[in-house]
Amino acid sequence: MPVPDLVALRRTFLAAGTANPFVDRTILELADHFEDLVDAGCADGLKRSDAEQRALATLGELDVLEQAVRRQPALKSWAWNWPRVASVFYPLAWLVALPMLPVAAGVAHAPEIARWAGGIVLAAFVTATMFLVLQLSIASA
Amino acid sequence: MAQSNPPFMSGVPELLLLRLLDDREMYGYELVRSIRQVTGEAISLGEGVIYPVLHALERNGALKSRRKDVGGRTRVYYTVTAKGRGRLERLADEWRRVQSGIDTALAGAASAGA
């Protein structure tokens, strides 16, 4: 079935140095545009498969879209614009981020961790109370 | 000194998009249809190519967008900002200047040929 190859489009846009948010937006809008074109084709009396074929041709070839993206320097990612800065920044960012991952995981699972902590505190309290009662009963005997 | 006109060709899609969006908010498919309509089908694009232009205009502050759910689909609607109106005026002036120059040249060539 002819549908836009969104994976190939994404790969092409990223290879052209386009920043991720713009790639996502472009893919979303192209997919929506394709659906509109197919609907229009069906409304013109075409079979869905023919409407899809026509919609693909109308949307533009992959290399045409790639050229259109390449012509827009404003859409390039900063790593594409400053590759040397990126090659220094990314390793440093990972060095900072890696120790933070357990903390982030803790924050992400805060309710479970709070439940476990509550359970442990309650168990410690019950045990301490039992020991206290035992101690008092021995002392009074 | 003669002014240069770098936006002469590359600015045409921008000019059309800004002009149409100056009237009302639209999304990509609607814009392409409007371009066809207002230019009498003289300009037809590979329709997907308008999105990089729209995104670049938004990145430069000439447009702003908002997402809207319509019939189970997420559509991105664009409108012109004040900065975009300024850009539209500059591009339109540039276009008129170039058009007038070409008209003059064509008239001159016609009279020289007569």
Image (cartoon, helix red, strand yellow):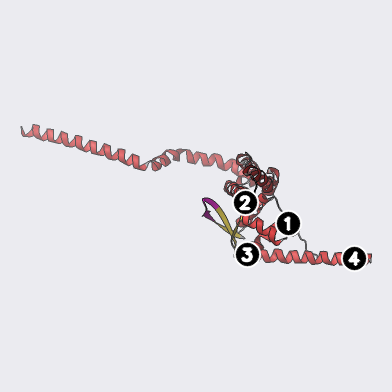
Find numbered disc 1 in the image and state the secondary structure of the residue it sits on.
Answer: loop
Identify the residue position indicated by label 4 in the image: B110
Give the foreground label among 2 and 1. Answer: 2
The answer to whether tags 2 and 3 share a subunit is no
Mark 3: amino acid: Asp
Q: Which chain contains the residue that carries disc 4?
A: B
Q: Which chain contains the residue that carries disc 3?
A: B
Q: Earlier in the sequence, mark 4 or mark 1?
A: 1
Looking at the figure, which quarter contains the N terminus of chain B?
Answer: bottom right
Find numbered disc 3 in the image and state the secondary structure of the residue it sits on.
Answer: helix
Sort mark 4 into few (<14), some (14-19) or many (20+) by Cα contacts within 10 Å: few
Query: Mark 4 and mark 3: span between their CA atoms?
Result: 37 Å
Query: Mark 2 and mark 1: span between their CA atoms?
Result: 24 Å
Question: Is residue B11 visible in the rendered structure shown here?
Answer: no
Query: Mark 4 and mark 2: span between their CA atoms?
Result: 48 Å
Sort mark 1 into few (<14), some (14-19) or many (20+) by Cα contacts within 10 Å: few
Do tag 2 and tag 3 residues touch (Cβ < 8 Å)? no
